[in-house]
Amino acid sequence: MKIEIKNNNVDRALSRFKRKMDEDGKLQIYRTRQRFEKPSAKRRRQKMEGTLRTKKRQQKDNIDPKKNRLY
């Protein structure tokens, strides 16, 4: 990844670099691969992330999860 520094403004170039790294997701992948994660812990983490995503989506749509049960 290449970032140009314009007008000797290193701070702006650094913020651009950080933004590009966040958009690519490479830094997140690097952090998760730094340590070994047991398969059971990985499944548990993914399940929790999924439930948090659905709760966040429901709150965004102002839907009460207890009132919209299918059973």
Image (cartoon, rainbow, N blue to C red):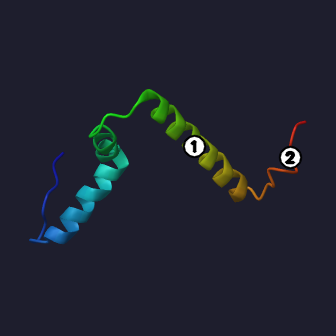
Q: Which residue is mark 1?
A: 48
On the image, the x and y values in percent for residue 42 come to 46, 34
51 versus 42 height, above or below:
below
Badge 2 amino acid: Asn
Q: Nearer the viewer, mark 1 or mark 2?
A: 1
Q: Given the image, on which type of amino acid does mark 1 rest? A: Met
Q: Is 38 placed above or below 3 here?
A: above
Q: CA distance from mark 1 to mark 2?
A: 21 Å
- Determine the secondary structure under disc 1: helix
- Residue sitting nearer the eye, 45 or 70: 45
Residue at (48% x, 30% y) in the render:
40
Tell me if 33 is positioned left or right of 70 in this view.
left
The quadrant the C terminus occupies is top right
The residue where tag 2 is placed is 68
Q: Residue furthest top?
A: 39
Q: Quick one: which residue is furthest to the right in this view? A: 71
* Residue at 44% across, 28% down: 39
